[in-house]
Amino acid sequence: MIVPVILAGGSGTRLWPLSRALYPKQLIDIYNEHTMLQNTLLRLENVDEMAAPVVVCNEAHRFMTAEQLLEIKIEPHSIILEPMGRNTAPAIALAAIKLLEKGEDPVMLVLPADHVIENLNHFHEKISQGNDFAEKGFLITFGIVPASPETGYGYIKKGQQINDLSYACKIECFVEKPDEKHARDYVLSNDYCWNSGMFMFKASAIIDQLAQHAPDMLALCRQVIESGTQDLDFLRLDRELFGKVASDSIDYAVMEKTDKGVMVSLDAGWNDLGSFDALWQTGDKDKDCNVLKGDILTQDVKDSYIHAESRLVAAVGLEKFVIVETGDAILVSPRDRVQDVKKIVLQLKAKKREESVTHRRVYRPWGNYETIDASLRYQVKRITVKPGAKLSLQKHYHRAEHWTVVSGTAMVTRDDQEIMLLENESTYISLGMVHRLENPGTIPLELIEVQSGSYLGEDDIVRFDDVYGRKEDKP
């Protein structure tokens, strides 16, 4: 039995402004009609002995993750919620401990949730080859046959070939992201592969190696699992205890130290979509080699990536550029400088700008809201509530709200009163009033909310009841 372990906790800062802390690249549809997380799971269809997946994600992304699995009709083994990022070694340790609880010892296929793999037949063949080694107690990493001298990837140097198999070898060493000269040398030598971050091993095998090479981390991860609480498909972890776990990659913690490592080469059209240049490389191009998404006009533009979400974008006389427009931000960069986008995100974080955290449209378990206009003492939002969903029973200390239904039907609680609102009808929620909004209908409920008051932050909320288990300080 093979259990996919999907690592979905990244932040994707190099794809800002498309990717944000609360809505990262693995949860958006930047490659095709499915999100990156969904693509990762769908490409495992028709693989023999593939069991229900374990997904490890950030606690803040739990509802979007669960909903995206539901959309593609995949029921997870479990969804492990990390209170904060601790890199790949603890995430893999948690998944292995969880899988061993019932006395089974499956092979874990560890996959980051943000990769593209074009040749699925080749990928499935490599899974089968890796599984043969994993069943014998080896720790498999998939090395990507390099197509170019990339400086954005780590490399793995090939060791001795195993059993005269052209696709499998020992691991001589891992190499950090090189400069351009060393990257060219690595590719020309044919002795190196890109480090994909994909692995296969039996749950017991990785636990044994963690016990040898990272015993303190493993001991803490056992405590974290033991103290965790199950909530439907979610495994909630204790924040304080998990915060004590050392942050480390599985490469550093185990793979660079073990004598059980095997690299299986993979040449299947792989890309980690780690930058806008990667999106250009993998995208469908027009006659001028441009990748264009959205309402875009160009004149004398070549070899560029342009993405427009909310308005017309016009470009003139550009070559090898990236332009990305969202409702609240615009990025302009030469294609060969897009790795520096993360430095812009650092500036946004230093200034405590919301644009580093969330989009103008914010997703919630009940639906979403989008800020249309805002000033010092008022804010206007478009709210969409899914059929059958409802917001928490709550009140605000600093703001009043006026709701107008645009489409659908709203059931509104106002203190001890319940009222039904239809299209073009409205109600007023005064400051301090206990209230709730729900959609009893079969189509999405859309309404306009006008907030007014001295403070309009999302943390001005007191929850009395919530079907999604959110606390007062968690929107």
Image: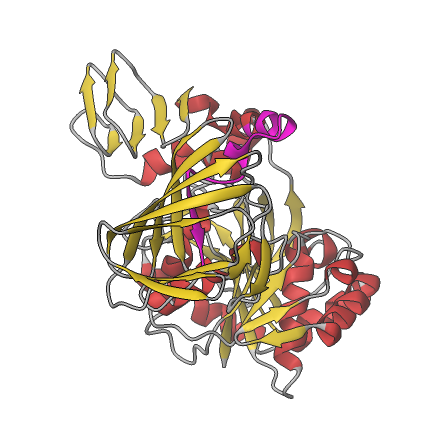
Residue most extreme to the right: 216
Residue most extreme to the bottom: 103
Q: How is the image coloured?
A: secondary structure
What are the residue bounds of the magenta stretch?
Answer: 345-365
Q: Residue at x 52, y 58 (%)?
A: 434
Q: Is residue 354 magenta?
A: yes
Residue 471 as seen in the image, left or right of residue 335: right
Q: Residue 46's quadrant in the figure?
A: bottom left
Is residue 188 in view? no
Q: Is residue 250 magenta?
A: no
Residue 436 as seen in the image, left or right of residue 195: left
Is residue 335 in view? yes
Would you place residue 381 above or below residue 166 in this image? above
Q: Residue 303's quadrant in the figure?
A: top left
Which of 157/249 is in front? 249
Q: Residue at x 57, y 27 (%)?
A: 348
Q: Residue 244's quadrant in the figure?
A: bottom right
Residue 145 on image: x %, y %: 45, 47
Q: Residue at x 46, y 76 (%)?
A: 52
Would you place residue 11 above or below residue 466 in this image? above
Residue 107 as seen in the image, left or right of residue 444: right
* Tally of numbered discs: 0
Which of 360/20 is in front? 360
Which of 364/269 is in front? 364
Residue 343 on image: x %, y %: 58, 26
Would you place residue 95 above or below residue 296 in this image? below
Residue 166 on image: x %, y %: 47, 59
Residue most extreme to the top: 317
Residue 185 on image: x %, y %: 54, 31
Q: Residue at x 15, y 27 (%)?
A: 287
